[in-house]
Image (spheres, rainbow, N blue to C red):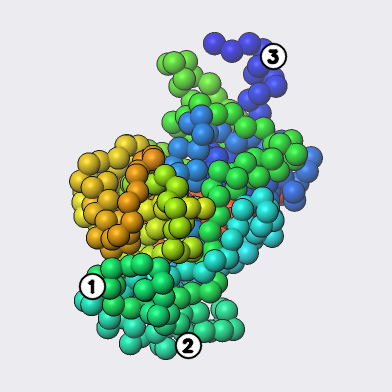
Amino acid sequence: MISFWEKDTFTHYNLIVIGSGIVGLTTAIEYKEKHPNNRVLIVEKGTLPSGASTKNAGFACFGSLTEICDDLESMPKEEVISIVEKRFKGLKNLRNKLGDNALDFQQLGGYELITEEQTHYVNRMEEINEMLYPIFNDNVFSDRSEDIDTFGFNKEKVQKLLFNKYEGQIHTGKMMSALLKIVRQLDIEIITGTEIEEFYDLGDRVVCSSYNNRKKIDFYADKCCICVNAFTQQLLPQLEVIPGRGQVLITHPISNLPFKGTFHMDRGYYYFRNYGDRILIGGGRHLDYKGETTTELKTTKPIIENLISILNETILPDIPYKVDMKWAGIMAFGDKKMPIIKLLSDRIAIGVRMGGMGVAIGSQVGNELAQIISALEYQD
């Protein structure tokens, strides 16, 4: 039950954005900046964003060499180039919008550890550099195998080490805090702990319904943007958007940690980085695709043990450490890596399926989604 005052004040908007991750916040910000007099509401089902925006590894990356090669096996070359460009533009958008200090952005470079079984990928480095040259006006990948010893990696496990100077790392929490600061400055309203379970285009407006404590509350808007990524199937089961859990752990500080930067392994399925003198490592979803196709936020013993094994055997073979924390985030994948950005009706648009690259591509998706929904202003 709601009062007249609540109904009159808190249930009617020009735009409702469902989801408060990177895409949702960016969409609301870009729209509000174009239409400062319009009322905008963001609705988030969790206390904090529920997917991966505050639970990822903080990689400012766009794809490792082996991942791009792997994508070329199942995607047209033009599509692979397009998605790398979207990721690169998204990172530029994020940095321009928030500033490097607010992001704690550090361009320490990115590396990829190549095993003996993967050395054939190195033979394609010149081809991939040529393919990506129009985006960067530079060769992206180079051989830095001389750093294997410097970084202390197990040389029996790591045969080659590739380098990408354009990659960096961010502080995920600071990024989201900076986006929320802009949201508040623009007088965008946000409601957390409220899940939208139904939405309809009524022709002259959109209704979004929540059933908190079995009590229905309807929110109305001229337009609506759905930015729920990993949780898309709960609202739109017909879309090809599959959740994928990413498990992560971070160590206590390690004295004299011998490397800094972001690191990839095995087509992007494993990733690790330094955070100060700590190591953050995540991945292993491919070890149990079925089990990790879930929206359940928890870690599992087999995958955490696998990450620890990689730390022990490959990354830190001679350095003692202790695990400080472990957690999980939920990403979204599909039969294609290109995000879904489109109108569902005359008043409802969607931006989902970040393909595990939400930090990079999320702000670009938000920009494009805001442009789509702004083009419907004639309906106001």
Task: Say what amino acid the circle numbered 1 marks.
Answer: Glu
Along the horizontal axis of the image, is 22 left or right of 245?
right
**Closer to the camera, 102 or 314?**
314
Along the horizontal axis of the image, is 363 left or right of 231?
right
Q: How far is mark 1 from mark 2, CA to CA?
A: 31 Å
Residue 41: image location, x then y, percent: 63, 34
**Closer to the camera, 244 or 175?**
175
Q: Which residue is mark 3?
A: 5
Residue sitting at x 66%, y 28% = 12
Task: Report which quarter residue 325 is drawn in.
Answer: top left
Q: Is residue 359 above or below residue 188?
A: below
N-terminal-most mark, 1 or 2 = 2
Residue sitting at x 49%, y 46% = 53
Q: Secondary structure at mark 1?
A: loop
Q: How far is mark 3 from mark 1, CA to CA?
A: 69 Å
Task: Say what amino acid the circle numbered 2 marks.
Answer: Glu
Residue 64: image location, x then y, percent: 41, 71
Task: Report which quarter residue 112 is drawn in.
Answer: bottom left
Q: Which residue is mark 2?
A: 130
Image depth: mark 3 or mark 2 in front: 2
Local packing at callout 3 (Cα closer than 10 Å; few below 14, some 14-19, many 20+) is few
Residue sitting at x 34%, y 71% = 113
Residue sitting at x 60%, y 45% = 174
Q: Which mark is residue 156?
A: 1
Along the horizontal axis of the image, is 161 left or right of 82?
left
Residue 213 seen in the figure: yes
Residue 222 seen in the figure: no
Task: Say what amino acid the circle numbered 3 marks.
Answer: Trp
